[in-house]
Image (cartoon, rainbow, N blue to C red):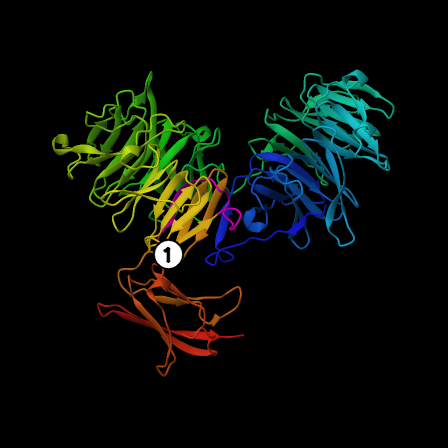
Amino acid sequence: MKRVLSLTCLLFPLILVGQWQTFTNTSEIRQFTIADSMLWSATNGGILRVNVNTLEYKKFTNTEGLAQIDVVAIAHSPNDQLWVAMPDGLLQIMAIESGEWDSYNEFQNEIKVNALMPHHDFVLVGFDKGIAELQLDAKNRWERTWKADIGAVNTILITGEHIWVGQQDGVRRIPLDFPNKQIPSAWERYSVGDGLPGNEINELIQFDGEIVAGTATGIGYFDGLEWSRSELSDHNVQSLCRWKEQLVIASPLGVKVRDQYGLWTNVGQAGANSVSVKSSSNDNLWLGTSDDGLHVWADTLWNPLALNCPNSNVFSDLLVDRDGHLWATSTKKPTGGVYYFNGTTWKNFTRPNGLATFEYHAIEEDLHGRIWAGSWGGGVTLFEKVGDDSITFTNLYSMDGNLSGVIGAENYVVITDIKSDEHGNLWFLNSDADDKRVLHVYDLEDRWQHWLATESASEEGIRSVKVLCLEIDATGRKWIGTGSSSGGGANGLSVLDDKGTPFDTSDDDLKGFLDETEGLESNHVTSLAEDQNGTMWIGTTKGLNYWYGTVGARYSVINDNIQALLVDPRNNTWIGTAGGLSVLEEDNFTWKHYTTSNSQIVSDFISCLAFDEETGELYIGTTNGLSRFKTPFTKPASNLNAVKGYPNPFIISEENPFYYIDNLTLNPHISIFTPDGYLVKTFPKTDILGARVRWDGTNNDGQIVASGIYVYLVTTKSGQSASGKIAFIKP
């Protein structure tokens, strides 16, 4: 069966090359291989390539050709190809010199690949049901030549005469020239009864004329006739390699090396997370870990390879601050916390370097530019920028007891959302509070006010202690969504109208609420966002609702499990779901959808969103990485003083298809003329996206204009105007 496909992406017209960028963490090493001076690592965040001599590195993610971001197996072929396997069984092949990718999809959604072993003219694939061989056919396409259902294959070794496989029930081998390898009974099996120290085989290598097996209960040696001896019975040996003519093993007990006398000694203090060990051509020893990336041995210690990236791939909230810098929270154990990105460099704040906990859920900026982060169990942490490069933080925990702990643990404070209102007050959602105080407001004069949860429909109060999301509408009302990850405690929406006096509760109105009986798709409310027309969008785990005087529902979202909502400066509503990203345009009619199948978004499970109004960049947090999507929806300027056009000259090409006129006001009129006043192009309102419009070099008839000098003119109804020259060059 021939199943070779060229890897392509089917994109919507809005998606242009270069509009997507992926940010991932690559600390979870699945496997790695070393060929010449390059180390190639399969990770949770794509492929990491490292030059073992210079330590320079490069990531390969979905924006560099990978079909999926999580890579489970990797191998380098003698033909200078890189083979990788995805969790669903898809195989991809990269020609290293050209960087071009092909894929092989016969196994997709059918098997779980554990091992790859490319040879000169074939490739062996070990998977959860057996082993298969792929070869190139006469048309230079990969095809399966045989498959043997011999049980799960964990590792593969090819020697001069045999194919060896390590499995859950021992070791099997078969002669390379055997004609019917697909027959399970043709494979010779060795187990504990034949001298192996254990039946669970993690790796096989050839060392000094012997086959060495790394098992869950030590290592065994096959001398050509039998499994003659074993060692390290108390070690679950994950990996084996040759280093400086010595045998090295990696296990949860660390890394050990065997000298010429058969004595084993520790190589540094490697931890229980050791999963793979390999030596490079320059005699460096490399260690891959399950949660702490790559390390290289430096005579006396293991040096971690420092990477510029977020500390995990799980994102729970995002914020673009007043400087245009990104803040992110993560709930990933044990690497979660708060991450900061200034456009060039990532800084990661985690529990090991002082945070109250590793699980943060919410982030907000106050009027002074300070950043407030809410955690699960650690209360609140405050971050402040000091100068250009330094950031300090203070764990405020319960803020002197004003935030409430859970039942039986008064210091275990759960903050699920934080919002700043137009007066600079900070509002905190305090879920699972033992004293029922689930909503708090705090001002810069250190005043506090609190609101209680009630489970009685006859009492005023917030309808559940499981408060999850908060939005403040244009009139100042506070909308509180309830629910939890387990689904318990979900009781719809409560609405607080404090009449603009949050520290005087005598005039409060907490009668407003919405639930399934009022038309919500679900009582589990995950996200809220108000648009510029005053419509409150309500995301639930079973669909999208809105409130505009009454409850309504929209049914064209790509997935009903809504996780995040955001309204951009153009009044488009972005909807993050468990199955992709949808956007409802400002006309409230047109939809676009983005998934891993039709775009370069990093994952389909969208957990949070943030927007940079100055650049039009949308940040998309997922459970498997972060995407940045360049949109044209920038915030309109207040006047035309800063209008600019670029690039100049405008040399139109496939790589440079547009001329941009930027820093526009709301609803401007834009035209392009020849120097003698002949009208060339006018732009309808639908083409002016936020503060920017783009010209593709065509006239009003859709034809490319001649090379020459052109003039753009921007005017407003109030009489403002701005103009500039365009030097247009048509190849």
Q: Residue at coordinates 57% horizontally, 43% vertically from top-left? A: 68
Name the residue rendered at 52%, 68% in the picture.
Answer: 653
Q: Residues within 10 Å of mark 1 (few under 14, many from 20)?
A: many
Of 461 and 547, the residue lying toward us: 547
Residue numbers of the magenta segment = 595-614
Q: Residue 288 placed where, x, y %?
A: 62, 33
User: Which residue occupies the foreground of this view, 471 or 385?
Assistant: 471
Residue 612 is inside the magenta segment: yes
Residue displayed at 31% across by 59% down: 636
Give coordinates of residue 34: x percent, y percent: 69, 40
Q: Is residue 117 above or below residue 661?
A: above
Q: Badge 1 is on which residue?
A: 633
Residue type pointed to by label 1: Phe
Quarter assignment of residue 295: top right
Where is residue 198 shown, x and y percent of the image?
Answer: 73, 19
Q: Give the answer, above or below, for where 97 lies relative to 486.
A: below
Tally of numbered tags: 1
